[in-house]
Image (cartoon, helix red, strand yellow):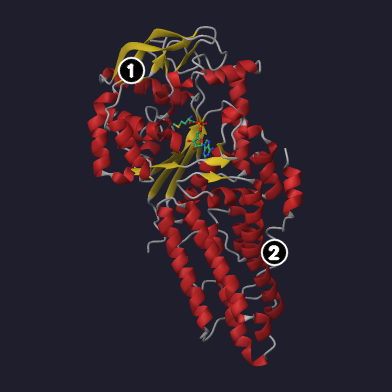
Amino acid sequence: MDYFKKGEKFYITTPIYYPSNKLHLGNCYTTVICDAVARFNRNQGKDVFFLTGTDEHGQKVSEAAAKLGKTEMSYLNEIVEDTKTLWQLLNISYDKFIRTTDDYHVFGVQNIFKTLYQKGFIYKGEYKGLYCTPCESFWTESQLVDGKCPDCGREVKVQTEEAYFFKLSAFTDKLLQLYKTNPQFLQPESRVNEMVNNFLKPGLDDLCVSRTSVKWGVPVDFDPKHTVYVWIDALPNYITALGYFCNEQSELKRFWPANVHIIGKEIVRFHAIIWPAILMALDLPLPQRVFGHGWLLFGGDKLSKSKDSGAKDCIDPRVLVPRYSADAIRYILLREIPFGSDGNYTNEILLNRFNSDLVNNFGNLVSRTLSMLKKYFGSVIPEVKEDNLPSSEQLKVVVKEETDKVFKYMSDFDVSNSLKCIFNIFSQANKYIEQTEPWAIAKDEGKQQTLANVMRNLVETIRIGATLLQPFLPDCSQKVLECMSIEHVNFSQIDKFYLLENGQSLPPLPILFPRLDIQTELEALKN
Ligand code: ME8
C-alpha cells in the first residue's frame, strides 16, 4: 500500500456558492468533504490546491441586494465576509477563494467567450422564453406557479430576445465516447446512467449563454449589451482561478486538469456535460473526476437558500460550531451521510453521535489511556518487549487492516466509510483495555513488562488513529498528536506500529469532548 506520494499534484474544488442568501449546513457539507479530502492528500505528501469561492452574478443577487437597499457589491461583500468567517469557523484549509466578480475571472470569462465565438462554437440566435414584464425575468415552464410568475403571481408571456448560444449539440457523440472510455469520470456510478440515458442519448440542445435582460453579469466585450449567462461564467472559475488567460504558466500548468470537482447531485449535469464540452471546445484536458454527492435533508426536505435554511438557528453552523466545536460538526457531516446518498440531519443525531462516538469512544480511550499511563508509568512511554498476548496481535491486525481500508476509501473520496474505519480502530483499542484489564495486571508485581506492553500498544494505536483522524477532525487530533510531540502530521510512517520514543513523556490532556445532556441541549436548540 502506497501511503505517501510525495510531489504528486492534487487539485480539488467545491462548487462556487451563490451568495443569494447566507450559506447553510448543506453548503458546509460539500466544503467540509473537500477539506477532509484536501487535508488527507496533503498528509500523503502531495502538492495540493484546494479551491472554493462564490458565484456572484445574475438577477437573484441584484434582487437580494435591492431588497436590502444595497448595491450589489456592498451586499456581496457582506455575504462573502460571512462565508469566509464560516469557513474559518469550520477549519476549512482552502488555498484560494475565487469571486466571479474578481477582475482576473471577468477577464478570463470574456476571453473564453470570445475564443469560443471565434472558433465557431458560439453563435448569435434568439432566446424564446416565458417573460414577466414587471419582474423583468424569464422563467421556464416548470418554474411557473399555477402558470404565473413565481415571484409576483402575474401573467407571463412568450417573448424572444437576441442571445448567443453555445453549440452543445456538437458534443453529444464526444461525450458519449467519454462515458464509454472513461466510466470513472463521473461518480457515483449511478449518475452515469442518468447522464447517458436522460441527456446524451436523446441528443443535446444548444445552450443559451448570454442575456440582454440581465444587467448584473460579465459583459460580452465584443457585444456589450449582452452579459454572459450563468454556467459559462461559473464553470470556468476552475481554470481562471489558476490563471487561465492571465498567467497560464503558473498554477494552470501545475494543477490543471483537476483531480476532482466535488458537487451536489443537482448540478452534476452542468459539470458532467456542459463543462467537459466547454473544455473540449477550448482544447483543454478534462477533469479526472466529477463526484456528485447526495443532499442533507432536514425534516425530509433539502436544505436550501431559497427556504432560508441558513437563518434557522437550530441548524445554523454559526450557532452549532461555537456550541459543540468545529470537529463535532465536521464529524456529523462527514460520518452520518452515506457518501453519494441523501442523509437526514437532526440535532438528535448530532448529539447522540457526539456522546457515543466522540465522548465514549475516542475521548474516553484517550483520557483513560493517559491517566493509566500517568498512574502506572508517571506519564512516560514504556519500552515494549516480548509481547506475546494474542489480544495485542489482534489489535495490530485491526489497526493495519482499518488503516488500509481508510486509504482505499479515500481514493474514492468516501469520507463516511473512512471515518467508520478510524473509529473501528478506537473501538478495538477500547476492547483491548477490557480484554487486558491493565488495572488487574498492575496489581501483579511480576507482570510489569506485560503492563508496559499494553500501555505502549494503546499509546501507539492512539497515535495512528489520531494521525488518520487529523484530516477529518483537525482540532482534537492535533491536541493528541501535539501531546506526543508530533508537530508536522503526515502519513509517511503510518504503517509503523512502534514509532514513539521509549521514555518520552506524555503530558495530561484536558477533556477532548465533554459529555452532553441531550434533553438540555435539545431544549436550548429549539427555534
Ligand atoms: O449551484 N445538501 O450554487 P449553490 C448537500 N453557483 N449539499 C448541498 C445542499 C444540501 N441540502 N444544498 C446545497 C450553485 N448544497 C452554483 C454552482 S459551480 C461552477 C456553480 C451544496 O449556492 C451542493 O454542493 O446553489 C450544491 O451543489 C451546492 O451547495 C450548490 O450551491
Is residue 289 among what the camera can see?
Answer: no
Q: Secondary structure at mark 2?
A: loop
Q: Quadrant of the C terminus?
A: top right
Q: Earlier in the sequence, mark 2 or mark 1?
A: 1
> What percent of the width, then of the height, locates residue 45?
44, 55
Could you tell me the amino acid type at mark 2? Answer: Leu
Q: Kindly give the residue lying farthest to the bottom in the view shown.
A: 446
Is 88 or 176 nearer to us in this picture? 176
Question: Where does label 1 land, which residue?
Answer: 165
Could you tell me the amino acid type at mark 1? Answer: Phe
Say whether mark 2 is within 8 Å of ligand 1. Answer: no
Q: Kindly give the residue lying farthest to the front in the view shown.
A: 146
The structure residue drawn at horizontal position 39% and vertical position 48%, both measured from the top left corner, is 9
Is 12 or 158 nearer to us in this picture? 158
The structure residue drawn at horizontal position 62% and vertical position 45%, both measured from the top left corner, is 346
Say whether mark 1 is within 8 Å of ligand 1. Answer: no
> What percent of the width, then of the height, locates residue 193?
32, 40
